Amino acid sequence: MTEPLRVVIADDQALVRAGFRMILTADGIDVVAEAETGAEAVDAVRRTGPDVVLMDIRMPAMDGIEAARRILAGDEPPRVIMLTTFDLDNYVYAALGLGASGFLLKDVTPEYLVAAVRIVRDGDALLAPSITRRLVERFTTPGPRESPLHRDLAALTPREREVLILVAQGLSNVEIAGRLFLSEATVKTHVARILAKLGLRDRVQAVVVAYETRLITPS
């Protein structure tokens, strides 16, 4: 029997937490803790070892970005989904750079909330690379800058760099396979190797890296 999916909800609004808890538990998802501040969220994750954290970006004392940074720096960290009111938010971009698996708007539908939590638990990125690209294009500035995701791309083969560029352009594995005349399985292997060589968690981070290293530039 599959173990229930375990979630921590971190948001400074009690009504948001209560609403999300009701939606998730109704679908058989186990909400193991709630947190009102970033510090409480970090502590809750340490105590309960959840699979997924729903993390509000703006919270008192310690915001969601710092809380996510501390959580994702741990050993075998949970997946983190950022909660925000705005779909193009520079804080979301920062969170993606730290390793968050995506973001949700707080007015998300119950069905999508449940699907999102299950998607990231299974290891997939929540948001489409094309949406991530819009975030990166908006918040990446020209010239040198510090990036938590800066990586040396020299470890990649020419084919892997080619695949990374297409991933950053928002293409799916099927689309990349068609563009490069490869099998989908071969593309999946290339993507897995790219993530492993660059120390990335998912395709969302790969998109960010492609822009941060200027492998691809905003159009």
Image (cartoon, rainbow, N blue to C red):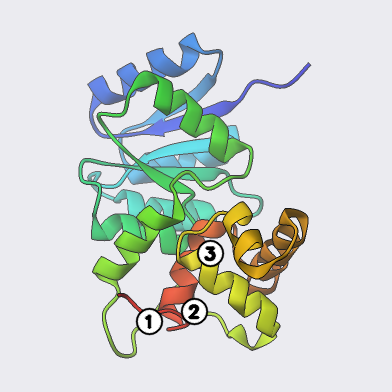
Residue 98 in view, yes or no: yes
Give the x, y percent position of residue 1: 79, 16
Q: Quadrant of residue 5?
A: top right
Quadrant for the C terminus, please. Answer: bottom left
Residue at image coords 30%, 34% = 11
Amino acid type assigned to the residue bearing label 3 in the image: Val
Question: Which of label 1 and label 3 is nearer to you?
Answer: 3
Please say if 136 is above or below 63.
below
Query: Label 1 to label 3, Cα distance in Å?
Result: 23 Å
User: For mark 3, what is the residue?
Assistant: 167
Answer yes or no: do the residues labelled 2 and 1 have beta carbons within 8 Å? Answer: yes
Residue 73 in view, yes or no: no
Q: Is residue 154 left or right of residue 99?
A: right
Please say if 28 is above or below 165.
above
User: For mark 2, what is the residue?
Assistant: 150
Question: Which of label 2 and label 3 is nearer to you?
Answer: 3
Query: Label 2 to label 1, Cα distance in Å?
Result: 8 Å
* Mark 2: secondary structure: loop
* Mark 3: secondary structure: helix
Residue at image coords 44%, 49% = 128
Residue at image coords 53%, 64% = 167
User: For mark 1, what is the residue?
Assistant: 146
Residue at image coords 43%, 42% = 81
Give the x, y percent position of residue 79: 54, 44
Amino acid type assigned to the residue bearing label 1 in the image: Glu
Label 2 vs 3, first from the N-terminus: 2
Q: Residues within 10 Å of mark 3 (few under 14, many from 20)?
A: many
Amino acid type assigned to the residue bearing label 2 in the image: His
